[in-house]
Amino acid sequence: MDAAPGAERLAIARSEVHRACDLLVASTPEALQDSQNALADALAALQEFRRSQPPLNSAAAPLAKALRTEVIRAGRLLQNLAGFYQGWERILGAMSGGYTASGAPAAVSRQGRLCCRG
Amino acid sequence: MATITSSLMSASGALDAFTEALSVVENNVANASTPDYASQSEDFVPLELNPSQGLPGGVKAGQLISSRDEYAEQAVQQQTTLLGQAQQDVNSLTSIQSLFDISGNSGIPAALNNLFSAFSAWGQTPDSSVAQQNVIQQATAVANAFQQTATGLETAAYDTRQQLQATVDQVNQFASQMAGFNQQIMNGNRADPALDAEVHSTLDQLSNDGSISATQQSDGTWTVLLNGQTPLVMESQAYALSVGTVAPSANSPNPNGPAHLSLLSSDGTDITADTTAGQLGSLLNTANVVMPQYLGDETQDGSLNTLAESFAQNVNTLLTNGLQSNGAAGVPLFSWTNTTNVAQTLQVSSITPSQLAAISPGPPQVSNGVALALSQLADPTTGLSYTQSYANMASNVGSLLDTANANLQTQQAAVAQAQNVRQQVSGVSLDQEATILLQFQQAYEANSRLVNILDQLTEDTMNMLITS
């Protein structure tokens, strides 16, 4: 199958980032993994658009702007999620281990152990 | 001494229990990806707090889970605050944008275009009474268009004040409800799940209006602060906010400009500068930052007034420097009655058509010099035509609205995300949640890298498309 023309590659990239946003909203661990794939697909489409040096037309600029809006949204959603977990991690650290000498919450200890069940 | 010893012993016992429970969590996390691994759980043992009997209390799992759930509630409230702000931004800017027509078919741009056409036609037949009459008519239309836009903005500013008052009334109403809930809790209904649901529902609604922080006290009552420091509710007492105005000071650059709106705490403290989020923050920003850009305040005249004054002043200057056909000096075409609100008071002076001065005195004298100069009049500060200056002002509103709409969509998604996270962590055990955390950390790094690259590439792409 032929590669999609330039503007369509941008549309594909936007669609994939939009899908990543939906997955980030769902925010389950599985959805987070899937969002990674969607972002990777978007990146591939965008790189393809840039490599192909398509004939520029009036349709490309609005699509690029819409794509950028979606990327900024994905970044915000990812930051929100990170902020939530990092915030809770700090609270959990302070509640369980107190504070370090510098005043920062103690790190939550996570030693790995394997449990074998017969 | 006995009390200290027992405290140390109890604390030590609590720590042991906690360490043991944490190790179970660690084990579950370490085996998160192990096939068929059945997670284990261990409850934290609650320790009684009774100093008179030497029981110092301590950390317990219930407290952690409760804290985690409240933290998730706060995350939803924080995102709801930003959603309230984004929604109000869109509403306010949509109202303002409707006043600025950039199509050129109506309002100020259409009136300006028609007047320049009239100047041009007059330049071709400077002694034509029809052409002169047309100039007066189109100038009247320009004055009316400025008046209508300024009046529309004044109405929007008034509506903003009304909305701010309504939002403050709503905040005060929610604060009273919360004080009532606290009274019920103090009366012994602390464990009532229906009351708990009402408390959280009220806090969610309150967070739409402003940035609130709600903390539950040891007696079960809720303390609610606005902007992290202004009390709204403490025990059974609600502290009402109010709206005020701050008139420009006498020694300010524009002492007769429009007043700012202010938000006052119950003790009269001005908390406007701290109130930047939620519906309250948006309305204050619209009233004190966005509107003054067009209508002015104590430090500025406002771009609409500046444009109206510049245009009228330049037209008048050209005309009064010219000569009428009978040799008399020219008279001004425009006048205004309020120097701080030129746009709203702009009108055509008592000039008659025959008093329009088309002759440029020179030397050499040109019979249509003034009329031609008027038809080519540009804003001397920018070098742009007045129509273009107006279009730039209008497109600025459009750009603000575009950004606000994008923020609104993002924020709607962010609230849904926070609600989903709250749903996922609510009621689950700490080790389940810790497993989610570990999986998130792994996914976050990869996602973050991809978003950063996409961010850079999309910016480059946009620059490439704009410059080509």
Image (tube, coloured by chain):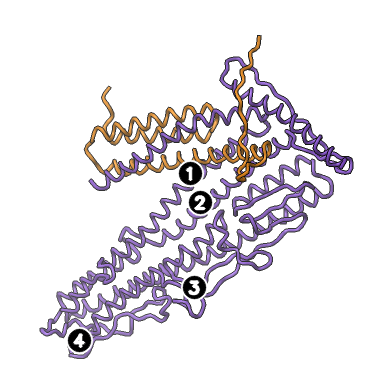
Chain colours: A orange, B purple
Mark 3 or mark 1, which is nearer the start of the sequence?
A: 3
Mark 1 or 4, closer to the camera: 1
- What's the distance in space between the residues labelled 1 and 4, CA to CA? 61 Å
- The residue sitting at 60% across, 54% down in the picture is B210
In the rendered image, the residue lying farthest to the right is B53
For the residue carrying disc 2, how many other residues have a C-alpha within 10 Å: few (<14), some (14-19), or many (20+)? many
Mark 2 or 4, closer to the camera: 2
Residue under label 4: B324
What kind of residue is marked 4?
A: Gln
- What's the distance in space between the residues labelled 4 and 3, CA to CA? 40 Å
Residue under label 3: B258
What kind of residue is marked 2?
A: Ala
Mark 1 or mark 2, which is nearer the start of the sequence?
A: 2
**Residue sitting nearer the eye, B269 or B79:** B269
Mark 4 or mark 1, which is nearer the start of the sequence?
A: 4
- Tag 3–tag 2 contact (CB < 8 Å): no
